[in-house]
Amino acid sequence: MTSRPAVAMVACMGMAMMTAVSCSNRAEPALAPPIAGADVQQGLVWGGATQVAGTRVMRVDLIRERSDFSSGSLSGEVRNILFLDPADKAGHWLLPDNRHFFSESLPFSPKRNDGEDSRPAGTVALVKTVGDDSAASTGRLLVFDAVGRIVEPVADNVRRLNAASISPSGEFVILFERNRQFVIAVVDQSTFKVKQQQPFDIPALN
């Protein structure tokens, strides 16, 4: 089972898992591809660009730049993800707007015969409303495929994403917190639709 890392912060690196990663030049945003419809005062810039493993699709993070990050790297809240497929004439966004940020995210990574992780079969992400980043804030839990073509809701009013795994039968299994309860959601890997949600009562300790 994959445990949750904090993913509100992103950084650009030279090489990762044999996939090239690069950053837009933060010093010359006027020379980068324009971000249509975005308020320039929000400080939105292009972040890291990576290839989706096993495909020709590229993904580029849209982030709100942090002004206190040292030069040479880029860090900030991930607001959206742009997918670029050579088969299409235009890219497509994962989310319909930039009024949310990715609070937490975990991949569903099947194990290969050698025990190593293979290309993620999908991702579960907790997105929250921009400006609402307190410890008690809640958001929507989403699942999406590797190239961002399928995006399905799992649950609303979610405070925290705890873990994600793939069951022996191939279903996505997600543990999260909502209304001060642990909840497990089971998601069909072929349709990305929720098959079951089970909240849990916590028995008192003796």
Image: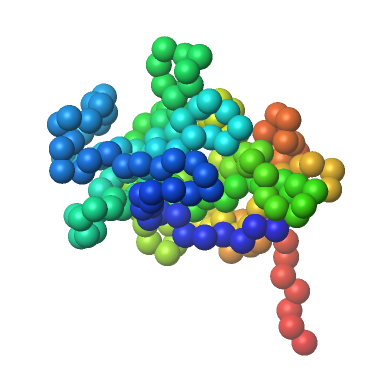
> At 77% across and 42% down in the image, what residue appears?
171
Residue 90 screen position, x and y as percent: 40, 16
- Which coloring applies here? rainbow
Q: Quadrant of the C terminus?
A: bottom right
Horizontal arrangement in the rendering, residue 46 relative to residue 50 (left or right): left
Q: Among all residues in the image, which is located at the extreme bottom?
A: 206
Residue 158 shown left or right of residue 184 in the figure: left
Residue closest to the eye, 86 or 176: 86
Left or right side of 186 for 155? left
The residue depicted at 49 percent of the width and 53 percent of the height is 104
Relative depth, front residue between 3 and 203 = 3
Residue 20 percent across, percent down from the top left: 44, 41
Counting from the top left corner in percent of width and height, residue 126 is at: 51, 48
Residue 144 seen: no
Q: Residue at x 51, y 57 (%)?
A: 159
Quarter of the image where the N terminus is located? bottom right
Give above or below for 103 relative to 171: below
User: Residue 201 at what x, y percent from top left?
Assistant: 73, 65
Q: Quick one: 42 or 17, which is closer to the camera?
A: 17
